[in-house]
């Protein structure tokens, strides 16, 4: 599953991930693409708070980030 959130600023990317999380079954993987500068720190904190597993958070270059979350 993928969620593309380019052009959104904090806190919108995390709010969108939280809304999408309600639809994702346990064990599934979500790839999130965002360009908000605080996204890497925000998604790490959200995963810790919610018990999701942050498999990776990678700088894709040009201010874009990719996070992979296991639910």
Image (cartoon, rainbow, N blue to C red):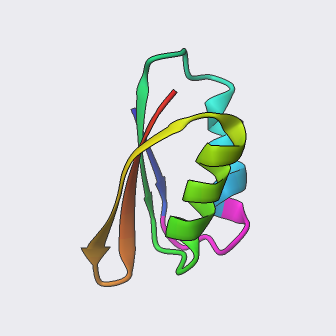
Q: What x and y, as percent, mark residue 27? A: 45, 17
Measuring 55% from the left and 56% from the top, which residue is drawn there?
44
Range drawn in magenta: 6-12
| Residue toward you, 3 or 26 | 26
| Residue toward you, 46 or 5 | 46
| Residue toward you, 42 or 48 | 48
Measuring 54% from the left and 73% from the top, which residue is drawn there?
7
Vertical placement of residue 3 versus 38, above or below: above
**Magenta highlight: main SS:** loop
Q: What x and y, as percent, mark residue 21? A: 63, 32
* Horizontal relation, residue 71 to residue 58: left or right: right
* Horizontal relation, residue 20 to residue 67: left or right: right
Location of residue 64 (image quadrant): bottom left
Vertical placement of residue 56 versus 51, above or below: below
Vertical placement of residue 36 versus 62, above or below: above
Residue pushed farthest left?
Answer: 61
Residue 44 within the magenta-colored segment of the rendering: no
Q: What x and y, as percent, mark residue 23? A: 62, 22
Number of callouts in the render? Answer: 0
Measuring 50% from the left and 67% from the top, which residue is drawn there?
40
* Horizontal relation, residue 51 to residue 37: left or right: right
Q: What x and y, as percent, mark residue 57? A: 38, 58
Location of residue 54 (image quadrant): top left
For the N terminus, the quadrant is top left
Measuring 66% from the left and 51% from the top, which residue is drawn there?
46
């Amino acid at each position: 599953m993928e969620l593309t959130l380019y052009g959104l600023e904090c806190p919108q990317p995390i709010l969108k991930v939280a809304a999408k999380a309600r639809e994702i079954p346990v064990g599934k993987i979500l790839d999130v693409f965002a360009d908000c500068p605080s996204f890497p720190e925000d998604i790490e904190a959200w995963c810790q708070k919610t018990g999701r597993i942050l498999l990776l958070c990678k700088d894709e270059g040009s201010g874009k980030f990719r996070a992979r979350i296991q639910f």
